[in-house]
Amino acid sequence: MTLLMRDQENQEIGEERGRREGKQEEAERYSQLILKLVEEHKESMITEIAENSELREKLYRQYDL
């Protein structure tokens, strides 16, 4: 294996790790938002945030998530 091939392989491994970590962080953020909505008795908004990414982002900012 050449140095270039190893560098490319390491880059791909790093990118995959970054994607997995990003997905995990987003899942945790989403869960935190749902818990906030439940805490405030706004369960009816859960379907809305699942369907509306703009609303979801607005609420992330509102709740500082």
Image (spheres, rainbow, N blue to C red):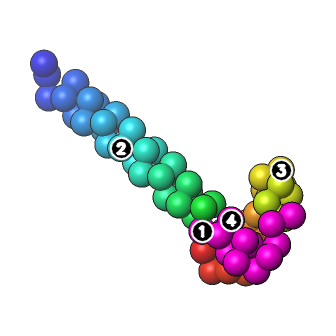
Q: Nearer the viewer, mark 2 or mark 4?
A: 4
* Residue span colored magenta: 32-44
In the rendered view, would you say 49 is above or below 18?
below
Residue depicted at x 83% and y 55%: 47
In the visual, does 42 lie left or right of 38? right
For badge 3, the amino acid type reads Glu
Tell me the CA gap for discs 2 and 3.
28 Å
Question: In front: mark 2 or mark 3?
Answer: 3
Which quadrant of the rendered structure holds the N terminus?
top left
* Label 4 crowd (10 A; few <14 / some 14-19 / many >=20): some
Disc 2 + disc 3, Cβ < 8 Å: no
Tag 2 secondary structure: helix
In the figure, residue 6 lies in which quadrant?
top left
Q: Mark 3 points at which residue?
A: 51
Which of pointers 1 and 2 lies earlier in the amino acid sequence? 2
Residue occupied by mark 1: 32
Q: Residue 17 carries which label?
A: 2
Is label 3 in a helix, a strand or a loop? helix
